[in-house]
Amino acid sequence: MTKEGQGRQDAGPAKDYAKYFDFSGAKVIAQEDGKTTYRINGRNVQISSPPDLREGKKRGKEEIRVHYDTGIGEDMKTFGAGRYYCIFTYGCQMNEHDTEIMRGLFEEMGYIATEDKQQADVILINTCAVRENAEDKVFGELGHLKRLKLQKPELVLGVCGCMSQEVSVVNRILEKHPHVDLIFGTHNIHRLPELLKEAHYGKEMVVEVWSKEGDIIENLPKKREGLRAWVNIMYGCDKFCTYCIVPYTRGKERSRVPEDVIAEVRELARQGFKEITLLGQNVNAYGKDFADRNYRFGDLMDDIRKIDIPRVRFTTSHPRDFDDHLIEVLAKGGNLVEHIHLPFQSGSSEVLKRMSRKYTREQFLSLVGRIRAAMPNAVLTSDIIVGFPGETEEQFEETIEVVREAGISMAYTFIYSPRAGTPAAEMEDNVPYEAKQRRLARLNEVIAEMSLASNLELTGQVVEVLVEGESKNNANVLSGRTRSNKLIHFEGPKSWIGQFANVRVTQPQTWFIRAEAIGLAEAERELPKTAGGV
């Protein structure tokens, strides 16, 4: 279904980032071990590493080290005994994966998960910096939590994730939300136990945000739930699209070595997970940073294809890095599903140039043609932005044309939202907001039309569904997804939840499909095996 970008932030004057964290007027309480404690707005604030936009943009040639000895110290394994934690997660699958790691760290320290804010001893807000709307939600939540913090002074309240990497965000928290106890970023999640200890015992706001990318940390605990698992294969992004803050908040591209990725996927297969999704800010750039081997994303997918796990997906990909070898591997099928999420953002070559996407409309459509030639049953979905600075009505119509010509069956659609510190935020935002809203509505109508047409093609067909649970609206109806990620509703026994079922499509709708149950799919799946199996 479509996702509408809400809210609007007009690009104001360029921010002077040098002024942030200039605490010349604040009282210095202590300086030791590289940490400075200030008295700000009536509270002590310990800053060991403030965010720095310029550092976040740098792409050094330092060797990225891989750390495997990442166990929690003995002194921390009972730190959370009898205490409860709660994490609110905003944003993309990468944020969800980060939350899985933090859950694992919490539970290794003895904490117990809760969704009740009143019960929680620690509340973390894992944030997204891509859209202004997500940022507004976070600050709204911080406002609501202020009363709870007054009621429970011992509550540790933390903000982490991509927003924490933004200098302006941390500055705003320091000025407006002194009830926050802990701020850390995307590069130092593994430091959560030590940061919690400092915030708990020090009774200070602790700020530690590493602005340059860190090393790769393996063997961190993860608490996964459900039938599907996220597997991060790389970190960071080097594309620097003019509208995007991610290269600043997530650092440069750095890939996990394939042996570690494959070992994790094999372990997930042993644990009985039915589906994995390989994650990266630009997942198909995997391996470009390897200096000691010629091994790219297509090679990784070809190796994972041989592991006995029923479904393998990936997100999110960039058209510029989608090479022919990857297409050849995906066309082999097996456990590699035929759903491809391929954000193209705009159908206008001129707008794409201003976005610094490094491909043209014609090149994107050529890529789609090669994908469809190799995979006629491929289902393509995308991300699309309307109202980018300078976008004309004619250029917007080019986007509509690409949606139709490429056969995009679903898209996450957004009104352009300026992000402070990105090049696009300095561009003249000369598209009236009313025009942006009209374009978004028109685009959503076309996407709905394309989605329904794609679903109607399945009428009468038998499809395989991974049964995920009961429908949110009707406990008598089961809900699941096809290999192409289409949502299916059908009546069947509750015992089927967690298994694969075959269903016949009866009533395709715009955003979901009604079907009738046939029976469980074969328990043993014919997938090629690795030597020795899993």
Image: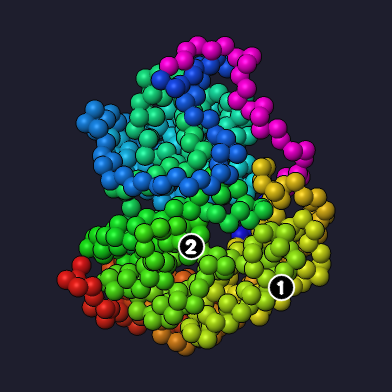
In reply to whether residue 14 is colored magenta, the answer given is yes
Colour setting: rainbow
Please state the extent of the stretch shown in magenta in the rendering.
Answer: 8-32
Q: Residue at x 25, y 32 (%)?
A: 73
Residue 506 visible in rendering: no
Mark 1: which amino acid?
Ile
Q: In this view, does 77 lie to the left or right of 136?
A: left
Question: Where residue 443 is drawn, which disc sits there?
Answer: none
SS type, badge 2? helix
Q: Which residue is drawn at 72% across and 47% down?
A: 425
Decide which of 157, 93 is in the foreground and name it: 93
Residue 372 visible in rendering: yes
Residue 515: which quarter of the image? bottom left
In reply to whether residue 314 is colored magenta, the answer given is no
SS type, badge 1? helix
Decide which of 187, 154 is in the foreground and name it: 187
Q: In this view, does 375 lie above or below 386?
A: below
Q: In this view, does 308 lie above or below 171?
A: below
Decide which of 56, 41 is in the foreground and name it: 56
Question: Where residue 285 is drawn, which disc sits there?
Answer: 2
Instruction: Name the residue that disc number 1 marks.
Output: 400
Q: Is residue 388 left or right of residue 100?
A: right
